[in-house]
Image (cartoon, rainbow, N blue to C red):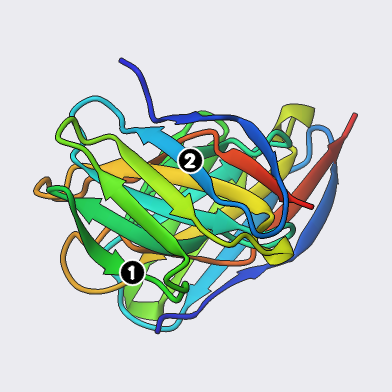
Amino acid sequence: DAGVTQSPTHLIKTRGQQVTLRCSPKSGHDTVSWYQQALGQGPQFIFQYYEEEERQRGNFPDRFSGHQFPNYSSELNVNALLLGDSALYLCASYRLRLANSPLHFGNGTRLTVT
Amino acid sequence: GIQVEQSPPDLILQEGANSTLRCNFSDSVNNLQWFHQNPWGQLINLFYIPSGTKQNGRLSATTVATERYSLLYISSSQTTDSGVYFCAVEEGSGNTGKLIFGQGTTLQVKP
């Protein structure tokens, strides 16, 4: 039973560029959330996708956008990268309609913006 | 929004010692999870524990929802227990899946 998988594991980009990160949820899960974890901080919620639509959004600018595909996998896109976007990006999945469904996290993508 | 505070921020133990990590939260919650983040960044579920007590090997957790706190106990600590421990609570009613994380407790277990 595959858990949450993310790609790539590491990425280096230059300021102003755009980046796409990918996530496949755990088998049986239909909802994907994205989190940003800056160094020394706890993860912060970016947004959540269910039924291919953005369901909730945290306090992040429109430069951060996403998509969910019919197979429940998801992408996170960040445009016009800033140095402050350097962080570990974590994807989490769960089953929305199942009560007491804990979130499971992937190993993350470490993004460095130079 | 919900505030989550963890204590202590840092903890250094000798292998074999026991420890208690605390998580306070500012509002009633439907979901509380404890995670361990290893040095490679992997965030691992330890407990899903909105209330009551659970045990898994050397780890156990207790959440007293009415008093808005949760405790994580680590007994007979091992060097592999090192890393950051996060408490996270679910914001909103129902199964929102939006977790609010504390700042974490960084644990170092020395051999």
* Amino acid type of the residue that numbered disc 1 sits on in the rendered structure: Arg
Is residue B51 visible from the viewing direction of this image? Answer: no
Q: Quadrant of residue A13?
A: top right
Horizontal side of residue A90 vs B105, given as left or right: left
Which quadrant, please, contains the N terminus of chain B? bottom left
What is the number of the mark on residue A21?
A: 2
Picture layout, residue B43 above or below residue A15: above
- Pick the residue in front: B104 or B109: B104
Tell me the chain of label 2.
Answer: A
In front: B29, or A77?
A77
| Chain label for disc 1 | A
Circles 1 and 2: CB atoms closer than 8 Å: no
Residue furthest front as drawn: A16
Q: Residue at x 51, y 37 (%)?
A: B44
The correct choice, above or below, for A40 with respect to B29 in the image is: above
* x, y percent for residue B104: 64, 60
Which mark is on residue B7? Answer: none
**What residue is pinned by disc 1?**
A57
| Residue A8 falls in image quadrant | top right
